Image: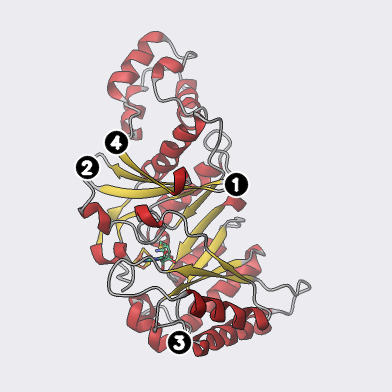
Amino acid sequence: MNMEKLETLLKDEKSFRKKQIIKAVFNEFIENFDDATNLPKDLREKLKKEFPLKIEHKLFISDEGKSIKALITLEDGQKIESVLMRHKDRNTVCVSSQVGCAMGCAFCATGKLGLTRNLNVYEILGQILLFQRLLKKENERVSSVVFMGMGEPLLNYENVLSAVRLINDKEYFNIGIRHISISTCGIISGIKKLAKENMQINLALSLHFSDERKRIEFMPIERANHLTDTMSVIKEFIQKTGRKIMIEYLMLKGINDSEKDAQKLADLLINFETEKAHGKNKAPHYFVNIIAYNPTGGFKSSDKKSINDFKNILTEKGIDVVERFRFGREISGACGQLALNNVCIK
Ligand code: SAH
Ligand code: SF4
């Protein structure tokens, strides 16, 4: 959807027309302007021809429909992926923020592609819209959005934040800000900026390694954004927003899944909390999300026992741990390991 084109098309129309169109498209989720009956017929015809609502895509379904991946072709032919995860009580859409990613994390399929370009605001919204249109047929809605698809959201800061505001906007998707999450590999400047937004958004840090020397080996971001500094800005974020942080930890067999690694993670988090916990609220301001690695090449996923032992060590130290539900493995639909499969799906 090309919003600049819409502006041009509406330049001789009454000013409230744009609002009506936005509402019809992003709040009532129409797929055809014939359904926007509050618009005059000639305008509807013009919009049908010149402002197509179609989002070009292919769908891949798995887990008996609980997980749906969309491969979306953008107007310039670039391809991105998004995933709908259907839980009992909510529908979460995992969106991409960039075509590819410049961060080059060794375990990530998107990282292998390098960065092509940032997504614009409406390319981000289009991903949610696509799934919302599907859900509408079942009288359901997208209830949460996570920026955990392709790309590093904090390196496309302005567009991601504008998209977040519109996802939250009553005239658009009207999804509560507390149901929107941004995941970052640790872009310090971006976290600082986000802390100043005065927003109750969720922030997730893809930590994956508590040892800086190990982290640098697999996550090049560590070279310029050291973990100690990242953890201090995370602290600022917590102090400013009062939100809990999600610490993501990807379990890579033989690399970061030993008991020693678990101890080290526990120490890092406990120190972090002790330094910070002067306030009235003594409850931990973080929880750990253990992520099973989806094999995309070069690494093996940890076995069940290592994952359980790892979790137990953290739990014994009083750290909250959850394990991300493994939706959509068979369609490569889990967030963060998208993209490379594009090569073979066509
Ligand atoms: N760039 C951001 C958000 C996108 S990646 C970030 O790195 O946080 C979303 C999550 O998927 C990150 O935690 C990332 O480390 C993880 N991830 C990457 N490759 C993965 C894989 N093969 N299996 C499971 N998770 C993966
Ligand atoms: Fe980029 Fe995130 Fe993948 Fe790292 S894990 S390469 S930051 S998308």
The amino acid marked with disc number 4 is: Glu
- Residue 264: x %, y % from top left: 53, 88
| N-term mark: 4 or 3 | 4
The amino acid marked with disc number 3 is: Asp
Mark 2 C-beta closer than 8 Å to ligand 2: no
Q: Which residue is mark 2?
A: 76
Q: Which residue is mark 1?
A: 88
Q: Secondary structure at mark 2?
A: loop
Distance from disc 4 to disc 1, alpha carbons, whole Å, reads 28 Å
Distance from disc 4 to disc 3, alpha carbons, whole Å, reads 43 Å
Residue 100, relative to residue 170: is it above or below?
below
Which of labels 4 and 1 is toward the front? 1
Q: Residues within 10 Å of mark 3 (few under 14, many from 20)?
A: some
Mark 4 C-beta closer than 8 Å to ligand 2: no
| N-term mark: 4 or 1 | 4
Residue 269, relative to residue 115: is it above or below?
below
Q: Secondary structure at mark 3?
A: loop
- Residue 6: x %, y % from top left: 35, 28
The amino acid marked with disc number 2 is: Asp
Residue at the limit of the structure toward the right, as seen here:
280
Q: Residues within 10 Å of mark 2 (few under 14, many from 20)?
A: few
| N-term mark: 4 or 2 | 4
Mark 1 C-beta closer than 8 Å to ligand 1: no
- For image coordinates 28% across by 23% down, the residue present is 50
Using residue 55 as the reference point, say whether residue 239 is left or right of it.
right
| N-term mark: 2 or 3 | 2
Q: Which residue is mark 3?
A: 211
